[in-house]
Image (cartoon, helix red, strand yellow):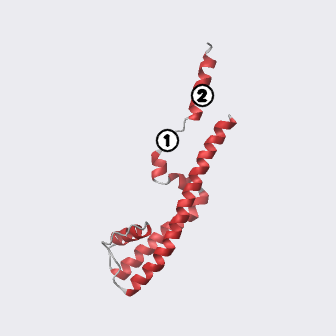
Amino acid sequence: MPPSQSRQPIKEIERELRVYRPLRNMFLLDMLRDRASWPVLGWALSTLLLGTLVYHWLEGWSYLDALYFCVISLATIGYGDLTPTTPLARAFTIVYVINGIVILLALFDRIRAVRTGRIEGDADDSAAS
């Protein structure tokens, strides 16, 4: 068998195999490469920053505690180890959580769209070859 014929099946197999890159997915690097995702990422990060600053100011929590509370609340986990104590902080929490959940849902939808498009793009590349 000539060497060119033996390499052909190997190239086809390599095209069909997808390379798994866990760090690209874990740290949302694929989202950073997609310019259309930047507004949603910015929106989500600014929501966390705003909540962190407001809870630091209203409740006197450290920045880490305030960020922790924001993440736990928006993820709808709510351990209960930190709770707003002032009426203003409680009112802010109501508005913050309702809006924040919507923002995170938009972020999750964008992650789905980017990763689905990447998978479909890989399939299109292999089909075109």
Residue type indicated by callout 2: Lys
Which class describes the residues within 10 Å of circle 1: few (<14), some (14-19), or many (20+)? few
Give the vertical position of 127 relative to 50 (above or below).
above
Q: Secondary structure at mark 2?
A: helix
Give the vertical position of 107 relative to 26 (above or below).
below
Q: Residue at x 32, y 79 (%)?
A: 60
Q: Residue at x 62, y 46 (%)?
A: 120
Identify the disc placed on residue 20: 1
Say which quarter of the image contains residue 7: top right
Q: Earlier in the sequence, mark 1 or mark 2?
A: 2
Residue type indicated by callout 1: Tyr
Identify the disc placed on residue 129: none
Mark 1 touching mark 2, by CB under 8 A? no
99 vs 31, nearest the viewer = 99
Which image quadrant: the C terminus? top right
Residue under label 2: 11
* Cα separation between marks 1 and 2: 18 Å
Q: Is residue 120 left or right of residue 60?
A: right
**Residue 108: horizontal and vertical position, in percent?**
53, 60
Q: Residue at x 43, y 74 (%)?
A: 51
**Residue 80: horizontal and vertical position, in percent?**
32, 72
